[in-house]
Every structure is written in C-alpha cells, then in structure tokens.
Amino acid sequence: MRKDMDSQTYGHPGKIFLIGCNITKRWQIRSVAQGEYQKRAGDKNEGISRYNNMTTTKDEKVIKRQMKVLLTTVDRYVSFISRSCKLEGNNYESSGGIRHYGFIPSDTKRILDTLSRLYFHMDSQGHKFLDIGCGIGNVVLLANLVGFDACGLEYNEEIYNVGKDLIGRDRILRGDMNAFTEYDKYDVLYYYEPICEIKAMLEFAAKLAEMMKRGAYVIPNGVARPFRKSNKFKEVILSEYHHTIFKKK
C-alpha cells in the first residue's frame, strides 16, 4: 500500500512537492464548482456562465506563475542536493565492469507532465512504478505524489544513502539493474539513461523489453530503440511535450 507523503518523511524538497499538489487541487476545485453551478441552475450554459463570472483570466495566470516558480525551485533544490553531496559527474562501475553515470537531475516539469498524463491515462489506481537507476529518488517522489505506488533502484551506495534519507528506505532498493530480476512485477518502468556505454545500454533495454509483463508501460528517457523497433510494443502519445512512452502488447 502506498504510504501518505508528508514533509516529515521527505524533508524540505518533499514540502515543496506537497505545496505543488495543493496548487493543482485548485483546478479540481474549479471543476467541482462548475458542476455544482450547473446542477443548481438546471441549465448547462447558464451554470457555466455564472461560474466563469467568478473566475478571471488573472486567477489562471496567478496559478500558472505559482507552478512555474514551484517547479524552478524544485529543480534548484535537486541540483543543490546533488552538488552538495558531490554526486553529479561521479561515474562508477557495477558488476561486469559496466560504467554508469553518477546522478543526473531530470527536467521536473517534463517528467511531472509525463507522469501525470500517464497516471490519468491508465484505467485504475495502485499501479507499481519503478525508477531504474533512481539516483536520490526525486522522480520516485514525484511519481508517488502523482498517485503511483513508486520505488527506485540504485546501485551506487553513496547516492543510495542520500536517496534513502530523502524518500525513505522503503521507497528505494539497492541493487544492480543488470542483475535485478523483478521487472515483471511493475506496471510502469522508467530510466534516465543510467549506463555510459551505448552498447551496454541497448543490451539492457532489450533485456528489459523481454522481462516486462504484458500491459506494462516503459518510459525510456534516452535509449529507446529496442522498444521502438519491436512489434511487441506500441507507442503511447498523450501530448507533444511528454517523454516517449511505450506499452507492451
């Protein structure tokens, strides 16, 4: 079961994400208010007209500005944490001598858009999400707040320890992505090109494609060739902005 996200568990970055959730709830409140006015008025057009008189374009601009400030702040927090812990650019080797990148921060706005759209695209709640090579767990935190039952997989001990403090030890696994055998237990898999060598990355993506269960989604941020060329996968297009998404047939 997904645990409630709270600032006590996730510290300052977690508080910022929770503030973002409160902002987005305003759009839900707007939809509820519109429906209530329609019901009271007994006429759809009249209800919408009465509601729109209460909500101005200026209000929408304020919310959009708040979201922009929030996402920019989150990106700076993540970069600050990685710089402070000297994680960026700190490449390392896992089993078999495969070279991996150190922590590379993702684009918060784009991954949040991708996760949100995919969450509402899927037909039920409680889907399990895995970030392969999750670093400090910032995408795991986002996925949990969006609604997924998310956790991350990280090999590097130093990065893992930072992630454990940020998102909680029950949300991050320490292990080698090439030796991990439980990819078929997840409904959504995500990675941000964790392996340095393109050949090794292609081999891992091909292996992941075989191990995934049918009906599962993959968000291959970086190398996606094995999914794009396979007739076992179909691309899912939810918007022009989100990351590439594939679903296993």
Image: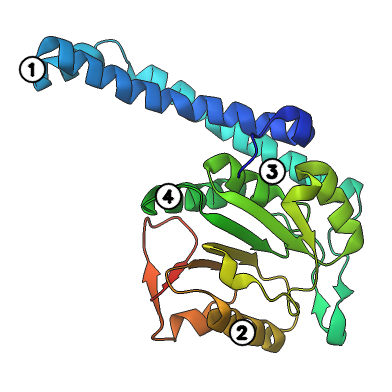
Reading the chain from its start, which is encountered first: label 4 or label 1?
Answer: 1
Distance CA(mark 4)–CA(mark 1): 31 Å
| Label 1, residues with CA under 10 Å away: few <14, some 14-19, many ≥20 | few
Label 2 belongs to which residue?
Answer: 207
Front position among marks 2 and 4:
2
Picture coordinates of residue 232, whole percent (x, y): 41, 83
Distance CA(mark 3)–CA(mark 1): 45 Å
The amino acid marked with disc number 3 is Asp
Assign a secondary structure to mark 2.
helix
Label 3 belongs to which residue?
Answer: 75
Label 1 belongs to which residue?
Answer: 43
Label 4 belongs to which residue?
Answer: 117
Assign a secondary structure to mark 3.
helix
Q: Does residue 231 lie above or below 239 as drawn? A: below
Q: Nearer the viewer, residue 190 or 52?
A: 190
Front position among marks 2 and 3:
2
Picture coordinates of residue 156, whole percent (x, y): 86, 65
Residue furthest out toward the front: 1
